[in-house]
Amino acid sequence: MPAPSKSTVTSTVKPDNRAFSPELSRRNFLQRIFRRETLIGWLFVLPALLMYVVFVLVPFMLTIRYSFFKWNGVSPAIWVGLNNYVNIFQVPNLIGTIKNAFWLIVWFSFIPVGLGLVVASVIHRVATGRFGSVSRTILFLPQVIPLVAAGIIWGWLLALPGLINQILKAVGLGALTRAWLGDFGTALPAVGVVGIWVLLGFCIVLLQTGMSKIDPALYESARIDGAGWFSEFVGITVPLLRNEIGVCLTVTVVAALAAFDIIWVTTAGGPGSSTSVPGIQIYILAFTQRAIGPASALAVMLMILVVVIVLPLQWLSRESAQ
Amino acid sequence: MRVVRGEFWAGRVLLVVLMAFTVLPFISIFMTALHPSGTVPGGLEWPANPQWINFVTAFNMAEMPKLLESSMFIVLLVVPATLVIATMAGFAIGLLRIPGSRVLFLLFVFGLTLPFAGIIIPIYFIERWMGIYNTRFAIALPLIALYMPFSVFWMRAHFINMPSELSEAARVDGATTWDLFWYIHVPLARAPVASLGILTSIWTWNQFLLCLVLVEDPTQRTMAGGLGAFQGHYANNVPLLCAGTILILLPTLIVFILFQRQIIAALLQGSLKG
């Protein structure tokens, strides 16, 4: 990449011209402009930086600070050191939210990405023309509606008289019917299904777009060598889609760890705390129980968790892009 | 490429099943919405006597006109502000490459995957202190800030690929930095700015957590926030809840169908770059 314009201009000044005063003054002029440039450049960044500092960086620091105190938001805060963090590991309800978050990764991330890969590889050659574009639009639909709406819709589908139980009865599995979101054993998988509904279409469309960029000649020659669908899938599709798979995993893992909307409107963390995730627990602790310290400690844990899990994924997809 | 016949049909069937899985929930709530208010119908039953009046009732109960106005106000505040300041910052970091631009860039990237729930508590206290709690600005201002990491990242990716000859030529003609930005680079950045506009509009319209925490009055929220409040009140009246949900989804669905290609492209690109 060429250097910024100013230095390009100065570098074209020949050494023997330096003795002449017009050139000298021109250089000073350029240096002056360059300093002015820096100032103006920073002015361009200033509004964005200001907003970012006030509403993201300062709150980020404050979250860390709050996490070392016992505070109800009104009376004076009391320093408690690392107690709030120790607490997270000792209280089953709190450490449980982190366990649930990991379970959600299976539902929100592994299943949509895994299933999405298989489905995309099967359909990417048949989803062409008008049929293909209609299918893209429909599969993408859950991605543009509010997650709250997805939660409400599925809250009704998974209810006792809802569609899911109706289908089960129709196919003779009436014994399985239950209030899926109200049962300790099935609430978390039921919430997971909502996540699949929201994220599967997105993964399919993204992966399918990636597959359409793979050179068909690769598949042709694999076929000539007698490769079946599976060896094509493992040998060509997956390795060449590393970047897209990395992106899908990143998006869905973040969606799982930061899940709030869907769970809030379907179960609000219940029954008991069987679907409680960090986001829900932070909200309950901070805004209904006024326990700012523990809530902030959990928030810090959540942010660390996201970075620790997402960073390797990013690195993986960057690596392959180069 | 030649597609084997069996494979062709297997693919089509799979696709149709998936589309049914995606669409059935919408059909289910639509049918439910037409049942008499207060009853508990089955999941997929066409009512004997469709109650279209439920949509009118839900429209009034959810205070739709106010909700629409509030959502529009917040989107019209957040999206243009985000586009302007992110384009300026992306220009300075990606094209002018001011001293410190690398550090600035890393600073913004740091926020890319930050969960909103992680910093919502201090935002609440800061807004109380600023006196904007429970106003539309309580949602709008933090949203602009929370979009900065992605938006700056997005615009920088555009500006960093702009040929420097363009800027040099303009400089020789005596253009100031502002001229360079406004007359040359902003018109060239129309496509990425448009995509960013689509993305931030959808995210703003669908925002829920900030609404829940920062605004108590549902009519000062965005659509998703209003829907959350509506659900709180009518959780036991399934037909009305479904009617309200459909009404709140309607603007999104219309816009999505009209601009489906642009929206899908923007969302895909957005996730690929972010």
Image (spheres, rainbow, N blue to C red):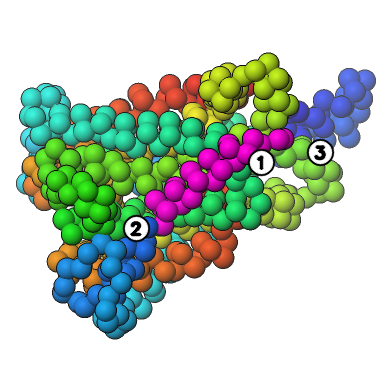
Q: Is residue B167 left or right of residue B100?
A: right
Q: Which mark is residue B165?
A: 3
Q: Which mark is residue B57?
A: none
Mark 3 chain: B
Percent position of residue B166, x then y: 80, 43
Mark 1 chain: B
Q: Mark 1 or 2 closer to N-term? A: 2
Q: Quadrant of residue A280?
A: top left
| Residue occupied by mark 1 | B159
Look at the image and say whether residue B12 sits in the magenta stretch: yes
Amino acid under disc 3:
Glu
Q: Is residue A10 left or right of residue A105?
A: right
Range of residues picked out in magenta: B1-23
Amino acid under disc 2:
Pro
Give a yes or no on whether discs 3 and 2 share a subunit: yes
Residue A4 in view here: yes
Mark 2 chain: B
Q: Is residue A123 left or right of residue A16?
A: left
SS at mark 1?
helix
- Alpha-carbon distance for marks 3 and 2? 54 Å
Give a yes or no on whether discs 1 and 2 share a subunit: yes
Check the picture and name the quadrant holding the N terminus of chain B.
Answer: top right
Residue mark closest to the camera, 3 vs 1: 1
* Residue B23, placed above or below residue B166: below
The one nearer the camera, B184 or A106, is A106
Q: Is the residue marked by circle 1 packed among few (<14), some (14-19), or many (20+) residues within 10 Å?
A: many
SS at mark 3?
helix
Q: Mark 3 or 2 closer to N-term? A: 2
* Residue A311, placed above or below residue A293: above
